[in-house]
Image: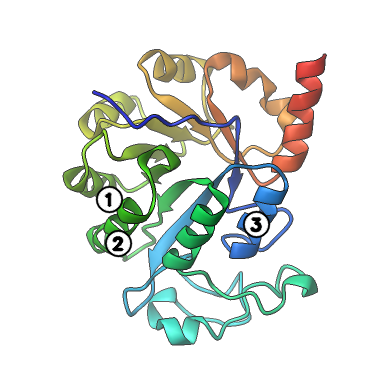
Amino acid sequence: MAHPDIHLPALIAHRGYSAAAPENTLAAVRAAFDAGARWVELDVQLLGDATPVIWHDGDVNRCSDGRGELLSLSLQSAKRLDVGGWFCDRFAGERMATLDEMLALLNELDMGINLELKVNKGRDPIALVDAVLPVVLERLPAERLIVSSFAADALRRCRERADPERLALGVLWGSVPKTWQSLCEELTAFSVHPDWTRLKRSQAEAMSQAGYKVLCYTANDPSAFAPRWAWGVSSAITDQPAAFGRFLDLQDRA
């Protein structure tokens, strides 16, 4: 089965350049681009009024000046939150990004995205897919998009709505189960996204040999991660794209 012609970089900026700017914000994506990253990994979920926003947690406590569940917020109330000042004063006044705003920036910068469908506890994976997927398919070319999730039901719904030639799907796991390949085959997945600290060499090699791209999260120690490249890993999803990139440059020159 054919997949989109996706040329993955070695490094994908996790939640944008989240070591240098508040995660999942427009500022973090601009910072990633300025640091040389051309792909980002971002999370999407729904507000209480069903607006898709770029956000990781089920609440706003950690990454804003507010408190409460994301589902309790309308777009108007979400936009009142300062989602940058918690990181440092320089980002005070940063606002929560809607999916529409983020897609506009990605197109402006010609960046690719691994968009994680974040299905937090008690959330409806089908409603999330139905709100998000038509928008991203309309706005982004297939070669700049991977949609991933830990939620198999969300990925199944994605595949119902888009064929493999149009949409690359990535399966997220913490510890990779023995049955990993059956789900990948069911979904006609493009990629597998394991926790790099739990990934075994035999698993990575089997994934790569089966034709799946292997994108490991969240790797911030390039020296410790280095042996994984020989296992067939395609990309490292990292909070530190600049430092990781410098390490790879030095390795290439060695």
* Occupied quadrant, residue 28: bottom right
Left/right of residue 172 with respect to residue 124 in the rendered view:
right
Q: Which mark is residue 154?
A: 1
Query: Is the residue under label 3 in contact with that under label 2 (CB below 8 Å)?
Result: no
Mark 3 sits on what residue? 30
What is the secondary structure assignment of the residue under circle 1?
helix
Residue beneath the point at 44% across and 26% down: 213
Q: Where is residue 60 shown, x and y percent of the image? A: 53, 74
Q: Where is residue 30 shown, x and y percent of the image? A: 65, 57
What is the secondary structure assignment of the residue under circle 3?
helix
* Occupied quadrant, residue 240: top right
| Mark 3 crowdedness (10 Å alpha carbons): few <14, some 14-19, many ≥20 | some
Left/right of residue 228 with respect to residue 154 in the rendered view:
right
Q: Which mark is residue 128?
A: 2
On-image quarter of the C terminus: top right
- The tag earlier along the polypeptide, 1 or 3, is 3
In this view, the residue in front, 37 or 50, is: 37
